Amino acid sequence: MAIAANRSGFSSLLTNKKTRKIVAPIIALGVFLLLWQIFTLLNTGGTLPGPLTVLIETWELILNPFFDNGATDKGLFWQIIASLQRVALGYSLAAIVGIAIGILVGTNEFLYDAVDPLFQVLRTIPPLAWLPISLAAFQQSDPSAIFVIFITAIWPIILNTTVGVQQIPQDYKNVARVLRLSRQEYFYQIVFPASVPYIFTGLRIGIGLSWLAIVAAEMLIGGVGIGFFIWDAYNSGFVSEIILALIWVGVVGLLLDRLVGFVASKVIPEEQK
């Protein structure tokens, strides 16, 4: 009877939608950690540590992410902050320039036909392929990293904004003509509100690509940053520190995505969601 009661209680947890959103990820995480631990136990010839080993070897880093011993010897919090500062600048520039270009291209058919093939070619270039070009142009690591973020994030913003502008219903355009709206009024009352959902789709994709790009770029340019921390740990043979840093990277990436999604939920009207 007790077993049956426990089963029914567990089933009720899974059927409750709100509870399931908490319980299900915990179960998935537990299964993942268990499989990881079993793999490391079976793979005796490998150097990949299990979750328990990672926890033991990085315990001091986990407890004290705020230490600062100067130069690049800093805790993970400061490494993440340095990376976020670069992302904030590069991503902000990409958002401003990308939205402006997207609206301009989306409202001009001739311009769209002219630049779309070029954009399609440039957007397929991997982020790190831009790094030698940016180093040659700027001669400094920080501006080069920021440029890599900018050039990586800008394409989904431009393309989604362009599509959003091109998808404005003809009825909206007809109303604008009937009301004889000025260009400024047409932009603020028709173009921008109608394309906002597409713009935020591009912004959400762009923030994820920005975070991916900075981690990769920092591995090569050095200095303080989570990417360089990972590369330095690899060169020193500290695999557990790499895994801990990757967890930080994943969590911060998730938070950035959720932040842009939250802003979108407040800006986009209900009828456009």
Image (tube, grey):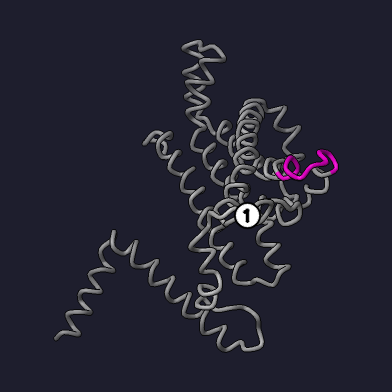
Where is 179 relative to 13, above or below?
above
Where is 199 relative to 229, above or below?
above
Residue 75 or residue 179, whichever sits in front: 75
Residue 22 or residue 232, whichever sits in front: 232
Q: From which residue to which does the magenta span run? A: 136-145
Q: Position of residue 219 (x, y in %)?
A: 72, 57
Which quadrant: the N terminus? bottom left
Number of marks in picture: 1
Q: SS for tag 1?
A: loop
Where is 46 relative to 199, above or below?
below
Query: Which residue is tagged 1?
Result: 69
Residue pictured at 41% horizontal, 40% vertical: 265
Q: Position of residue 155 (x, y in %)?
A: 66, 41
Identity of the residue furthest to the right in this view? 136
Residue 11 or residue 181, whichever sits in front: 11
Q: Position of residue 129 (x, y in %)?
A: 78, 51
Residue pictured at 62% horizontal, 49% vertical: 209
The amino acid pointed to by label 1 is Asn
Which quadrant: the C terminus? top left
155 left or right, relative to 27: right
